[in-house]
Structure formats: C-alpha cells, structure tokens
Amino acid sequence: MKNTYKHTERVFERATFFIIAILGNSITFVIASALVIFWLSNKLFQAQDINERIGDIIQGISFLSLLIIQRSFKRFSASLHLKVNELVKSDEHASNAVINMEGKTDREIAKLIHEYRELSEPAPKRNKRYFCI
C-alpha cells in the first residue's frame, strides 16, 4: 500500500510538472489565442443577445489571462529559486539539502519542514547557575 501511494505521488508530481510546463509555454498561448478567436468568430455571428456575446468575450479573455498568469508565475518562481539557491550555496554553514527544493517530492519537503521546525524551537530551559569569582 505504501509503495502504491509513493508511486501515485510520483506520477501526480510528474503530471503536474508537465502540465505547468505546457501552460507556461508561449506556443500554447498562440494556439489558445487562435482557438479563442476561432470560437468567438463562430459564436458572434450566431443570433445572440448582447449579454451572451459579452459573456463569451469575457470567457475567452479569462482563458488567455490564465495562460499569461501561469507564464509570469513560472518565470518569477524560476528566478526566485535561482536566487535562493545562490544564497544557500554562498553560505558555508547552510545546508545544501534545500537547494533545488522545487524538484523534491511533497514527502521530502514535509520531512525537511519538520527538521527545520525542530531546529527553530527553543532548547529546553536549563538550570543556569551563575558563579561569582
């Protein structure tokens, strides 16, 4: 059962990565734009009232906006990851386990979050004894 879950997670993560790569591609935007123009041109010549026409135009613009937002987020995310990786690499005391976090599975990320959460918790209070000399 555990192996099935791990396999399912890996397949889902690969599919997600693939879909994000497709949605953030400029060729996808060009194809989607042509598809929206074709769809709107066929719909606008049919007998519709103005509200249906405006609704169709808004749907087409929303669809294209999704692709633009995905593209800009993909660029922003990639540049942010590069900057963070450079900062981690430049500090000799930093853990290299956090470099390329975007390629890790959810389980690996959760494990690292747990480890860092434990590091950030304050140490148990000790009995401090002050000595006077």
Image (cartoon, grey):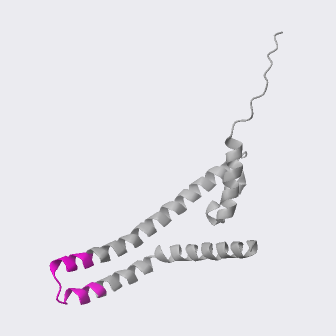
Q: Residue at x 27, y 73 (%)?
A: 58
**Residue 19 seen:** yes
- Give above or below for 98 relative to 68: above
Q: Position of residue 30 (x, y in %)?
A: 38, 81
Q: Quadrant of the N terminus?
A: bottom right
Q: Is residue 85 left or right of residue 95?
A: left
Q: Nearer the viewer, residue 129 or 39?
A: 129
Which residue lies most toward the top here? 133
Q: Which residue appears at 51% of the width and 73% of the height?
A: 20
Measuring 41% from the left and 72% from the top, which residue is drawn there? Answer: 67
All told, the count of numbered labels is 0
Residue occupying image coordinates x 66% and y 66%? 105
Measured as percent of width and height from the top left, residue 133 is found at: 83, 9
Quadrant in which residue 8 is drawn: bottom right
Q: Quadrant of residue 62?
A: bottom left
> Can residue 99 be seen in the rendering of this structure?
no
Residue placed furthest toward the front? 1
In the rendered view, would you say 71 is above or below 80? below
Judge whether residue 7 is colored magenta: no
Q: Position of residue 83 (x, y in %)?
A: 57, 54
Q: Nearer the viewer, residue 7 or 22?
A: 7
Q: Is residue 26 left or right of residue 51?
A: right
Predominant SS of the magenta segment: helix
Is 80 in front, or is 61? Answer: 61
**Which residue is more in the foreground, 88 or 97?**
97
Q: Is residue 40 magenta?
A: yes
Magenta stretch: give its range: 39-57
Instruction: Name the spot of residue 60 as percent of width and height, x first.
Output: 31, 77
Q: Is residue 1 above or below residue 119?
A: below
